[in-house]
Amino acid sequence: MQQTAWVEKRFVSDTGLEIAASEGRREWMAVLAKAEASEVSAAWERLEKPAYTLLRSPEPGLVLVRGRMGGLGDPFNLGEMTVTRSAVRLATGETGLSYVAGRNRKHAEIAAVLDAMLQSEAHHDQVRAEVIAPLEIAQAARRQLAARKAAATRVDFFTLVRDREPSK
Amino acid sequence: MAYVSVKGGEKAIENAHQWLAEERRGDPAVEEVAVAQIREQLSLAVDRVMAEGSCYDRDLAALAVKQAGGDLPEAIFLVRAYRTTLPRFGGSEPVDTERMNVRRRISAAFKDIPGGQVLGPTFDYTHRLLDFRLAADGAAPPEPAPLANEPQAWPMPTIGSVFAHEDLLEHDVRSGDDAPFDLTREPMSFPAGRDQRLQALARGDEGFLLSLAYSSQRGWGSTHPLCGEIRLGEVAVEFIPEELGFPIEIGEVTLTECQMLSGFAGSAQKAPQFTRGYGLAFGHSERKAMSMAIVDRALRRSEVGEDADAPVQDEEFVLYHSDNVEASGFVQHLKLPHYVDFQADLQLVRRLRREHFERLNPSKEAAE
């Protein structure tokens, strides 16, 4: 069901690092995409910014969201969502990419730069510690809060059984 | 014959639209409502616009609600129109609702469902009495909802997984992940696959689906449904960018999912078991997801050998009339100029009336 395996060469990092499919990259791209735009901007403001060029100006578009029939069956098309994508290259050669829900261009551009920085040995540890980790903690905290509110609304329905004992 | 184009009226149209803008704003002495206020405080209207507009974007849907002055089908039309201006990057991986961060999950069929009955934020069990405190200005925000010490366990087991080992519930068919039918790129075709039906129902009008589901419950094509499970929460969406070739999460969407259970007496080949109807909708759209699940099950009548004698079982009837953008377009086009049609009808009716009176009174005609 996926599109072609064709890869646009200009978006491939030329640093030779084999990190394209690494779990680490999937994880930080997820954290950056799921963060609030304001959180990403705030984290970005605190960083020393690297020199970079835009390979792809932030571009809003749509992704067709799919579900599964019955929850686990064959896919069907549920509806679309807005997504903004961007791609950048650092002066040092690393290529960063982003696909971020919504139409916030700044969010997409910063996420792409951070993705590139995370692939660079010079920036990786700092961005990981100062951007990704706090965003991840904030997201986990939001999930935790909702899960605690949900747990507070858990009920036990009980069915009433008619008392058949003769009254004394 | 359809309507014909007319010229002129530009000034009148411009003035009418200016008046519309004034009406939308209402009394300028009353503070203007912000898009963010609609997004946050009329979130269920926003959810409906996203679901039937078939585009998940809370800010966009809130803007559409504001622009439409609260007319939700009009807002849905605006969102549908907007989505045509954006390129499509591709299709997502199918969302995994088992891994939903559940805020609400109830089962009306199975009291002791593992994970429990979690009410979440719901209108259920409210008394439907108007709360005049909400009309008071400057009231403090409500107290935050209470927190349990232990968070709800994740993931929440589904009704399907609970009975899976007993084969009491029909299993979902997983034949492959070929790209499903896409109504936005292909015209409606019949007989429709379940993928086509579910897409149409997911973007279909809530009122229409609700009435169909209700008609089914009242006996017009009944499936005797029980609500196996409703769940509401956030689900991550994964997408494989062609530049990467592996899936990444691009964000989260709020979804409402409903599993309806219906008994099936079995056939010569199949043992009796419960069949299921499925509903899935963007946002907190419970009435919609439940209606969708009932209609989905009713439309699967041929799979279980049920007769088709009710509207809800007729897929052409259901799918051709479920889209409110198409429906209101066709109904409302009647207010556009039909002067030529009417002229033609007028001539025809005049001629028929003349012939009618000639038949009734031929002598008078001859005398004249």
Image (spheres, rainbow, N blue to C red):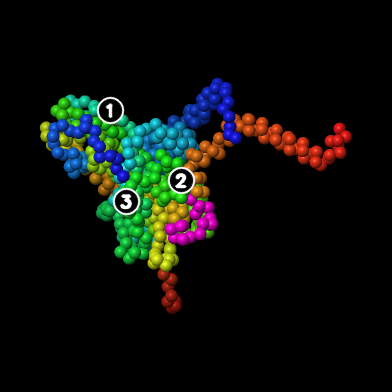
What is the chain letter for disc 2? B
Q: x and y percent of residue B8 in the render?
A: 57, 22
The span picked out in magenta is B301-315
The residue wearing badge 2 is B189
In the drawing, does residue B347 fall left or right of residue B91? right
Q: Quadrant of residue A30?
A: top left
Does the image show residue B193?
A: yes
Residue ID at (41%, 37%): B61
Secondary structure category for the residue under label 3: loop
User: Disc 2 versus disc 1: distance between alpha carbons?
Assistant: 39 Å
Q: Residue furthest left?
A: A122
Q: x and y percent of residue B133 in the render?
A: 44, 43
What is the chain letter for disc 1? A
Q: Residue furthest right?
A: B367
Name the amino acid, label 1.
Ser
The residue wearing badge 1 is A57
Q: Residues within 10 Å of mark 2 (few under 14, many from 20)?
A: few
In the drawing, does residue B335 fall left or right of residue B299? right
Secondary structure category for the residue under label 2: loop
Residue ID at (43%, 75%): A164
Name the amino acid, label 3.
Gly
Residue ID at (21%, 25%): A53
User: Disc 2 versus disc 3: distance between alpha carbons?
Assistant: 21 Å
**Residue B176, numbered circle:** 3
Residue ID at (24%, 28%): A55
Q: Quadrant of residue B139?
A: top left
Name the amino acid, label 2.
Ser
